[in-house]
Amino acid sequence: MSRSPHVGRALKKSITGIAAQLTGRETPEQLRRYADQARAQQDWARDAFFRRKVCEMEPERLGAWIQYGHALKEAGFHARAAEAYNRALALKPGDPEITLQLGHLAKVRGDFAEAQRCFEEARAGGHPDVDHIDFELKLLRKIDNSRVFWGEGAEGERVPLRVFLSAPAKPVNETDRSAASDGLGRSDYSYAFAMRGFMEALDEMEIDYTLIQRPESIADIRERSAAEINIHLGFYPPEHIRVLKGAYNINCFAWEFDRLRSRDEIPSDHAFADQIQTLSIADEIWSPSEHGATAVRDSGVAKPVRRAPSPVLSNLVKRGRDHAPTPREAERAARDLGAVNWTPLAILPRVKETVEQAAHARTRTLQAILSEFESPTVYVSVLNVHDYRKQAEPMLAGFLRFAETNPDAILMLKLSTPFRGRGLANRILLEDQIANAGRMVPPLVSERIWLTDDVLTRDEMNRFYDAASFYLCTSYAEGQNLPLIEAMARGVVPVSVDHTAMRDYISDNDAVVVPSHRRPLDLRMSQRYRMVGTAMNVVEPGDLKRALETAQGLSPEAYAHKSAAALAEVRDQFGLAPFADRLNAVVERLAAGDRT
């Protein structure tokens, strides 16, 4: 670490506030606390600065060097991060966790052979998270394609087809809580989840594919790929679209309104601000809903636009439910969610901090919550709390009215936000979903509605759905709505609106439909989405209350019918066959020389 002072000077230039106020008499415990605060804010430069000082004071402390390596890696000082990890490894030779971190670092630096060696060594060394390591090795095989990236492709044996995938966010490893949390709730993170479904489908079809970052940086993929046909599936909103030169570019993106932004609504003269123009850069557009595809076509995009939803393959149950979960079945599913903390709904703006603290003190597990009800019926919903389209207020207000006469009904809201773990779920829900200039916010305080912003693994999400009788959706608009579809794949009966993307798969046959009516975008929505003159679909609390009463009154036979029908819709519309048909049609056209 002979050059670490240079890193310290480089980092010190970017830190402000408490770092500038250090007296030099701080204890390692104080410095670690400052570093933890910086990490919670994802201020990696400050984090690394404090970790370096801890290492100077406690050079024999293993954890100090590991945490310093983490911070340096996130701050972009990869060579220094390797030095820190290796210093830790010298203190505890062969440690599988340190070896795993060296593997992650090698992957970030593009040294895929070293990454593979480290991952395999960590697994052989007894690292407990074998699923995570296997996922990384599988992903590495897709990324580390030597024919593509090391100049052998054009000269090697030709193959019929290779598919490339890229997105603004990296693929999500949902087997590991820490890895699954990366980027969750941030802008465009849902594109990574959509890409995951396409990856699973390509695996099922045994089609060779490669994940790439920054596809626009590759001069011509035909010089690197040994494929007769190269297809690039890009998962980008129009403003961030990326294409792969030399490939047939299909941009997959979700759109939920009736049209794209008009030229009069373009916020700037930036080249990528015009949605119609940027989407026309791709060779073809895939939209996950017929509503979205129609909106793009009608807006004047010059390229072919087709419906191609993200497949849902991995969490399907074998058959629909015979009945709603019994209290015992719900409690059994809740046992597997013991690491997830829930906070009661507590929104009272005038005294919000006091109410928030009181609610946070009532944090409980789902199993503990269920134990207070004689025969609980669990309703669930999943939403990015920063997404204005989710229309949470009528969901809360309507459920509270319903709960007045249904004492065993509870609603569990799984919120996605990058600000998780700070006890702010109620505040963020208020500020991003409910508060609106020009009106007083009504009090919403109840232990019949519970919130969590914890990260759940895929297995935990499945158990979350397994505990639920119904999934609630009151959105203004949706592009596909993967959480709703995934709940249906577990046999959960939806209580949902049936507009925009949901029109493809929600009906009286498989759901309890929540009525909605169209209304022009309000000022808040217009400002967020930079559109005027189009409409959103509004739910009234009273209509939701009546839909919930209908759901609660379903006979076991009616529930079983809707559960089976919901599962059938997922299999028919989001299974492997629809995706395979769509992709094979593209390949056949390209093989015949037709790019239209």
Image (tube, rainbow, N blue to C red):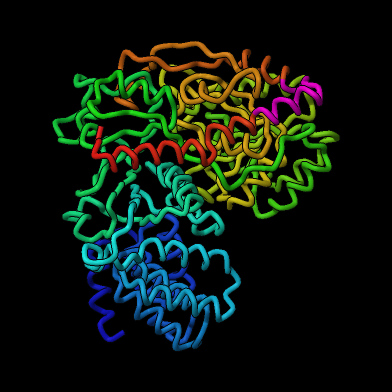
- Indicate yes or no whether the magenta region holds residue 561: yes
Residue ID at (32%, 13%): 533
63 or 466: which is nearer to us? 466
Q: Nearer the viewer, residue 566 or 517?
A: 566
Is 321 within the magenta? no
State the image coordinates of residue 272 (x, y, percent, origin top left): 20, 36
Seen in the image, is 223 located left or right of residue 538?
Answer: left
Is residue 105 rendered to the left or right of residue 568? left
In-image side of 432 versus 357 (left or right): left
- Residue 28 visible in the displayed image: no
Based on the displayed image, in which of its 4 quarters is residue 24 positioned? Answer: bottom left
Query: Residue at the location (53% across, 36% down)?
Result: 574
Question: Residue 105 appears in which quarter of the rendering?
Answer: bottom left
Question: Measuring 27% from the left and 42% from the top, which residue is drawn there?
Answer: 249
Magenta residues, start to end: 551-565
| For residue 412, above or below residue 64 | above
Residue 260 coordinates in the image, percent (x, y) = 30, 23
532 horizontally vs 371: left or right? left
Image quadrant of residue 149?
Answer: bottom left
Tell me the quarter of the image containing the N terminus.
bottom left
User: Depth check: 467 or 388 in front?
Assistant: 467
